[in-house]
Image (spheres, rainbow, N blue to C red):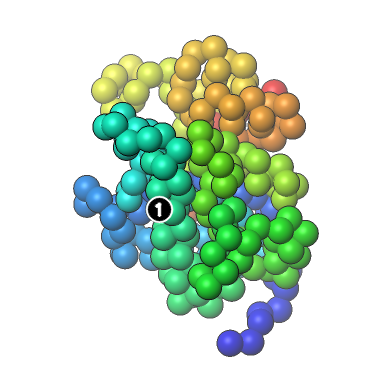
C-alpha cells in the first residue's frame, strides 16, 4: 500500500493537532464485554472525517471492555499484574481501531509503551511526531507503560509530548455536568469550567493526575458525546455541544 500524500490544512479547522481519548467501553456497543465491530467502524469513520480535514490525530483507547486493573486488584489480584493485564487490553483495542481505520485508507500506527515489535512500534517520541507530520493517525497503547497510571494520565502525557492543541474526551454525554444527567434531569451542563473546579467538585472528567497535568501545561480538555454522529468533526469546526475544561 503506497503512502498517501500529506493532508492539506483547511481554513475551517479550529485545531491542527489533537488527541482523541475514548474508553474501552466505547468499543463494546450494546454488548457487555469485548469489541463490537460495527461500533469500532463507526468511530473509525468519525476519525476519518476529521483526518480528511487535514487535522493531525493521536488516539488513546482504554482497556475496560477487556480487563480493568482496579477491578482485578479489588478481587484479590496483585495490583501491578492486574494493571499490566489492563495495558495489554489497550493494545488489543488499538489494533482493532487500526484495522478499522486502514480499511478506510487512513494510514495508522499503533505505538506501544510496552515493546512488542511483532505487532506494533515501540514509543519513540520523535518518530511518533514524524508520523503525525506525514498525516498518519497514531494510536498510543499500553498506557504509560507503568502500573498505577490510568489511560487518562497516559492520554494527557502523550498529548503534551506530541504538542497537541487539545484533548478530545469522548463520553456518553455532551459535556461536563454538575451531577449525572442520566440520573438527575435537573443536572446542569457547563459550557466552560476550570481545571481546579473539576478537581474540587470531583466531577470525574478524568482522574486527578490527568487534570493536574493538563492544568500545569495549559492543555484544554474538550468533553463531548462520542455517540453524536459528526460530533468530533463539528466541534473542530466550532459547532456542536461540548464542555471546555481549561483556565
As displayed, is residue 159 above or below residue 198?
below
Q: Depth check: 242 or 43 in front? A: 43
Residue at 43% across, 18% down: 178
> Camera-side residue: 82 or 22?
82
User: For mark 1, does the 10 Å Cα neighbourhood hold few (<14), some (14 to 19), or many (20 or more) residues?
Assistant: many
State whether residue 181 appears in this view: yes
Relative to residue 122, is residue 148 depicted above or below? Answer: above
Q: Estimate the x, y position of residue 203 in percent, counting from the top left.
A: 46, 21
Task: Point out the residue furthest to the bottom here.
Answer: 1
Q: Is mark 1 on a helix, strand or loop?
A: helix
Query: x, y (%) of residue 111?
Result: 59, 61
How many marks overall? 1
Q: x, y (%) of residue 78?
A: 38, 35
Q: Mark 1 points at which residue?
A: 89
Give above or below for 43 relative to 205.
below
Q: Residue at x 71, y 78 (%)?
A: 5
Quadrant location of the C terminus in the rendered image: top right
Hey, which quadrant is residue 128 in on the image? bottom right
Instruction: Give the residue drawn at x 31%, y 58%.
Output: 35
**Closest to the observer: 104 or 141?**
141
Visible residue check, residue 232: no
Q: Where is residue 27 in the image (x, y as percent from the top left)?
A: 35, 54
On the rendered structure, is 5 left or right of 84?
Answer: right
Residue visible at 65% across and 46% down in the picture: 158
Asked which quadrant contains residue 200, the reply is: top right
Amino acid at each position: 500500500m503506497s503512502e498517501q500524500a500529506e493532508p492539506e490544512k483547511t481554513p475551517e479547522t479550529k485545531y491542527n493537532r489533537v488527541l482523541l481519548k475514548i474508553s474501552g467501553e466505547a468499543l463494546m456497543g450494546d454488548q457487555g464485554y469485548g469489541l463490537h465491530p460495527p461500533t469500532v467502524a463507526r468511530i473509525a469513520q468519525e476519525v476519518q472525517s476529521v483526518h480528511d480535514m487535514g487535522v493531525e490525530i493521536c488516539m488513546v483507547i482504554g482497556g475496560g471492555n477487556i480487563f480493568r486493573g482496579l477491578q482485578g486488584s479489588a478481587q484479590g489480584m496483585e495490583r501491578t499484574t492486574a494493571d499490566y493485564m489492563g495495558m495489554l487490553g489497550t493494545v488489543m483495542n488499538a489494533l482493532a481501531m487500526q484495522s478499522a481505520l486502514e480499511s478506510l485508507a487512513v494510514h495508522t500506527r499503533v505505538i506501544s509503551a510496552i515493546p512488542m515489535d511483532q505487532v506494533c512500534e515501540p514509543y519513540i517520541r520523535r518518530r511518533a511526531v514524524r508520523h503525525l507530520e506525514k498525516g498518519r493517525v497514531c494510536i498510543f497503547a499500553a498506557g504509560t507503560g507503568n502500573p498505577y497510571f490510568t489511560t487518562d494520565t497516559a492520554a494527557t502525557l502523550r498529548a503534551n509530548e506530541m504538542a497537541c492543541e487539545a484533548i478530545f474526551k469522548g463520553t456518553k454525554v455532551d459535556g461536563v455536568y454538575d451531577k449525572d444527567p442520566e440520573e438527575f434531569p435537573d443536572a446542569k451542563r457547563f459550557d466552560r469550567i476550570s481545571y481546579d473546579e473539576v478537581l474540587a467538585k470531583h466531577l470525574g472528567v478524568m482522574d486527578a493526575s490527568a487534570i493536574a497535568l493538563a492544568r500545569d501545561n495549559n492543555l484544554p480538555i474538550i468533553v463531548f458525546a462520542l455517540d453524536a454522529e459528526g460530533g468530533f468533526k463539528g466541534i473542530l469546526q466550532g459547532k456542536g455541544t461540548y464542555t471546555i475544561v481549561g483556565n
